[in-house]
Image (cartoon, coloured by chain):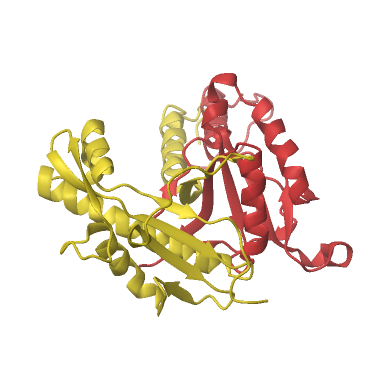
Amino acid sequence: MAKFRKKKSGGQTAINTASLPDIVFMLLFFFMVSTTMKEVDLKVEVRPAEATELSKLEKKELVTFIYVGVPAKSYQGLYGSEPRLQLNDQFATVGDIQSYIAQSRDAMRESEQAKMITSIKADKECPMGIITEVKQALRKAAALKINYSANEKAEVR
Amino acid sequence: MGKREVQEVNAGSMADIAFLLLIFFLVTTTMDSDTGLARLLPPMQEDQPDDTPPIKERNVFTVLVNSNNQLLVEGKPMEMGELTEATKEFMVNPEDKADLPEKKEQEVPFFGIQRISKGVISLQTDNGTEYQTYLMVQNELQRAINELREDLAKRKFGKEYEKLEKEEQDAIRTIVPQKISEAEPKNIGGN
């Protein structure tokens, strides 16, 4: 047990900083591992649909996201309350998909372009009309590997 | 109290504490991974003469979903819960019924000559169908196929499908193909 002592004037002791690197590295590792690059700010409301037979999206860098849903409250004045698309950080129309896909394909390494996956994140109450349009646009853009984003659902049978 | 040298705090165990914390965070943080149903879209065909032979009615398993999220399977209304069983019966056709799909014989590695169903699942939705319903239908169809594959893997190899070698999985996939076709969009079931 350490006992408190009256401090003698002068004679400042240096704190041992040998373990400071450890702490810094620890923080560094922690952030490196747990940070997912900030995905875009969602401007549309996406309540994920549920399913059971899911597969994981393995490689994040191969995935391009398309968000479909009703604009969030603060944007409804401007964009109305019909389901809309969001590509990157902006509202978009189905016509923009082709150039968006081409753009994200260009950003990939050539060897990986064929493995590109497009993930459709749509609100669960979104009507199929707009999703069918999106799918047609993806077919035109030759982005054929898609993934309907969904969350795990408790088994109900 | 006697005059003493100022003691240094022993920092030898600091690294241990740091690693402890590191490991704690590593274990407890869950990276949110994205999950979903993977599908392959058919390539866009532009102005190609449609000379593929028409598929026989008995080989097609039609699933229609209307704007009220109701199912019509092979002309009969159906609940979501029954879809998996119906799909399995269609794909297997155990009694070789005349209204269920034909089979063609084919040599498959590991299995020898097998009779493989020619069945195709056709899924058509209305513009007003909810996404969740559509996804559930896809999910049930997928489940039927997954269960058939799992069954076969258990019977033949005594292992789960996931744990098989790639060639074995390929063989099973040949016997239980996943043929889900989605019709070009149409407006059925009104408004």
* Residue under the image location 55 percent in, 74 percent down: B66
Residue A53 picture location, percent across and down: 38, 56
Q: Nearer the viewer, residue A88 or A117?
A: A117
Of all chains in the rendering, the one displayed in red is A
Q: At 46% across and 74% down in the image, what residue appears?
A: B71
Q: Which chain is yellow?
A: B
Relative side of B78 to B135, left or right: left
The vertical placement of B149 against A24, above or below, is below
| Quadrant holding the C terminus of chain A | bottom left
Residue B191: image location, x then y, percent: 68, 76
State the residue in front, B181 or B138: B181
The answer to which image quadrant residue B73 occupies is: bottom left
Looking at the image, is A80 positioned above or below residue A105?
below
Q: Position of residue A94 (x, y in %)?
A: 74, 50
- Looking at the picture, does residue A78 appear above or below residue A41? below
- Taking the image as shown, residue A122 lies to the left or right of residue A53, namely right
Q: Residue placed at 59% from the left, 76% from the top?
A: B189
